[in-house]
Amino acid sequence: MPPFLFMDRITKTFPGVVANNEVTLEVKQGAIHALLGENGAGKTTLMNVLYGLYQPDAGRIHLRGEVVRFDSPSDAIAHGIGMVHQHFMLVSAFTAAENIVLGLPSAHPPRLDLRAAGKRIAELSATYGLEVEPGACVWQLPVGAQQRVEIIKALYRGADLLILDEPTAVLTPGEASDLFRILRRLAVEGHTIIFISHKLNEVMDVSDRVTVLRDGRVVTTIETARTSPRELAQMMVGRPVLMEFERAEAQSGEAVLHVENLTALSDRALPALRDVSFEVRRGEILSIAGVDGNGQSELAEVLSGVRRPTAGRVRLLGHDLTGASPRAVIEANAGYIPADRRAAGLVTDFTLAENFILKSFADAPFCRWGWLDLQAIERHAGRLLRDFDIRAPSARVPARQLSGGNQQKVVLARELSRRPGVLIASQPTRGLDVGATEYVLRNLLAQRARGAGILFISTELEEILAVSDHIAVLYEGEIMGIVPGPGADAHEIGLMMAGARRSAPLARGHA
Amino acid sequence: MNRLRALTRIKLGGVVLGLAPVWAILAALLLGTALIAVTGASPIEAYRYLLRGAFGNANSLGDTLIKTTTLVFAGVGMAFAFRCGVFNIGGEGQIYIGALFATVIGLLRLPPVIHLPLALLAGFVGGGLWAAIAGWLKARRGLNEIIVTIFMNYIAVILVSYFVTGPLKEPPGYYPQTAEVAVASQLPVILPGSRLHAGLLLALVSAVVIWVVLRRTSLGFQVRAVGANPTAARHAGINVEGNIVLAMFISGGLAGWAGTAEVLGVQHRLRDFFLVGFGYDAIAVALLGQSDPFGVILAALFFGTLRTGSGAMQRGVGVPTALVFLIQGLAVIFVLIGTVLRARPQLLKSKKGESVRDLVGRIGRTVLKRRAP
């Protein structure tokens, strides 16, 4: 018997990236199949190809033994495929029932017959344990229930192959275990499920088989029962360290950033940081490793003053900055490189010269008695353009005209020109090419040599291994352990990134 | 060769788009000729009557510049709020409350030397506080400033009606109006033979001051940063909430001066419905002037001219006065299209196989999707 789904050597390229390189995926009917990999490994691209959102450059899709071709999601839906996206596609002002029938012809046109739909929704709910109140407006529903609406929406359209893209990313642990119960029930009833994740414990919990992707290629496909989290972690992150930097021995001084039992909530008011403690010393780089979305952005926001912690203490260069304003953090002489340079780091409509003084516009020599000294601002801009080798026609062009790498250089130039005692760099290499990445990392090392204490938050293990003096691993808002940077074991860190605690016998990196 | 062509296109595009208000006005007038021709009149004759009606003698010139004065005050006010990213629709209400505050001071018996300055100060503070309420509700409570300011317009107009029919009604008391404000508090006439008063000079000075504030002071820098990217401004340690409230105070204060100038310079007393629709026209003026004080002066003069001259045009060649509203609207639409094209020049590049109709449609949709300037 042919497999239920067979994706045969799928290749999909985007300008400059091979997202899927001859990826072959075989899925059995009634199975829960996990697709595991780091960010950017090609999981979502592969599923978007299957769902008809992308057309593959090469390769074929066989479904139920027949070759199929999907030009759009509606083709895929017609073939019984349903997808629940990471960001739900629901109209929040409509009820659950209205969302479920949205876009489908009514049973009794021109009347919108929601009663018949309601009956069918009730049946689906009962069969699979998908508890949903059909008359409730979506905006009133908790996220877990919204996700159930999405699943019913797919089933209502006759889906027997269900794709879920990182379904637990937005769920509380309780909601996640509810979801897993539903998925098992669906599988028992003969539905096939493909489940995208980068969380090892979930994959171990719920899947029958798992395919590991790395850099757009399949590493392996294996029965979940015949593997272990350790082995999966190795396959997921186990690539050689490519970057090598010359680094002087750390000239560690006193602690300049002291974080104690820090606890904070996310935008959705869920715990994002739990009891996080660490310290950064002068002349050292402490890295925060971890898979994206495990509390890194909240940590950076609390430290830079834009998010209030709910408990704990932050001391920076002798100032108590717990719950302080961004201005207080800046005045304590901390530099901050936000993860999203276009949204938080730059005013992209401002000129480069204006962006350079975004934090110091009110200080001498740029400002006297409320008046801006345009000449001083211009001189400063010219100096930074030269010193940081920023490729721009002049300091008078708006920042939005620059490439991503040069934009990041503008942020870097602004922060470093203030000679910060502590530098918080949140994902400073995100979206940059190799050359720009190297430039950023070299500058971090130069600041370290100057004697600044540096907190380097990154999802790129390779970069962390290349520059760190100490590595702390963040998982679901908790520090799994802190290890010394030189000679750190990538596999061990990979395991901690997946939720394994630092084994006891090894001493903590530093107290 | 290709590079050269691309270069000239960019340079030319920059210059053309930089003078967007001028081009938008010219394009609107040009399209206006076609509309006039449709009514059967001669466009040249029509525009001749329009100009004569607006500038033909001291009296008409004065009326044109009085309307311009009102629109410069209120338009620069709206523009200042826009630059801080706040869409102040409350010019109308701020005009009324500013006029009310100025009138109250104008009615008092005060030493002549300080009477006018105090009345002006009161007018600014009145409009400013009225607007700052909406700013505070946005900054601290997250209420949408568009909704709040529109509601507050109704409240302000009715409040003025209450005062001029109740507590502030003139002593004999037949009309819904106050007594005449003290002569010492009135703005002097500056063009003999017309009603044009010194408010025009104050309006022009205000526009220059706002221009300087925006470009050359740390206050303007903060306001612009908050308007262009509040998230980045907050990360840079700028007090976003405080700047929103302050920008609304200044914005409303300037609108308040539009009402103040009308009372102290023209009508010399406060009546109910004394100045209708200028708060909304000011939004169009600010948009047409691209939220730049000098652009606003130009746009205000354009609006003032059309409004004053339209009557003469109708009498002379029979073109309905409503035509000028069309021309005003067209100018605003053209300048908005220009704004979008400047921000996203790639829109101008036609896609493969795209007809002109599709191209125009695509640009139109993008323009409509864009919110405040």
Image (cartoon, coloured by chain):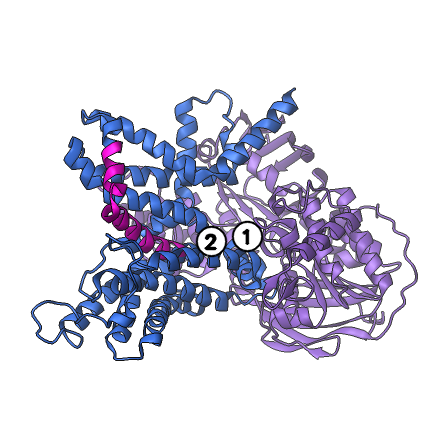
Chain colours: A purple, B blue
Residue A174 appears in view: yes
As measured in the structure, the alpha-carbon distance from the residue carrying label 2 to the one carrying label 1 is: 8 Å
Q: Which residues are magenta?
A: B48-76
Task: Give the percent coordinates (x, y) of residue B109.
Answer: 25, 80
**Amino acid at circle 1:** Pro
Q: Mark 2 or mark 1, which has the lower sequence index?
A: 2
Quadrant location of the C terminus of chain A in the rendered image: bottom right
Q: Which mark is residue A147?
A: 2
Residue pictured at 63% horizontal, 44% vertical: A397
Please give the chain letter of the residue carrying mark 1. A
The structure residue drawn at horizontal position 31% and vertical position 29%, both measured from the top left corner, is: B31
Kind of residue at badge 2: Gln
* Residue designated by label 1: A167
Q: Is residue B68 magenta?
A: yes
Which element carries disc 2, helix, strand or loop?
Answer: helix
Residue A94 in view here: no
Q: Secondary structure at mark 1?
A: loop
Q: Chain of mark 2?
A: A
Residue visible at 45% across and 63% down? B247
Q: Residues within 10 Å of mark 2 (few under 14, many from 20)?
A: many
> Closest to the observer: B216 or A190?
B216
Whether residues under marks 2 and 1 lie with C-beta atoms below 8 angstroms apart, the answer is: yes
> In the shown orientation, is residue A357 left or right of residue B88?
right
Q: Is residue A337 above or below residue A330?
A: above
Q: Is residue B316 left or right of residue B144?
A: left
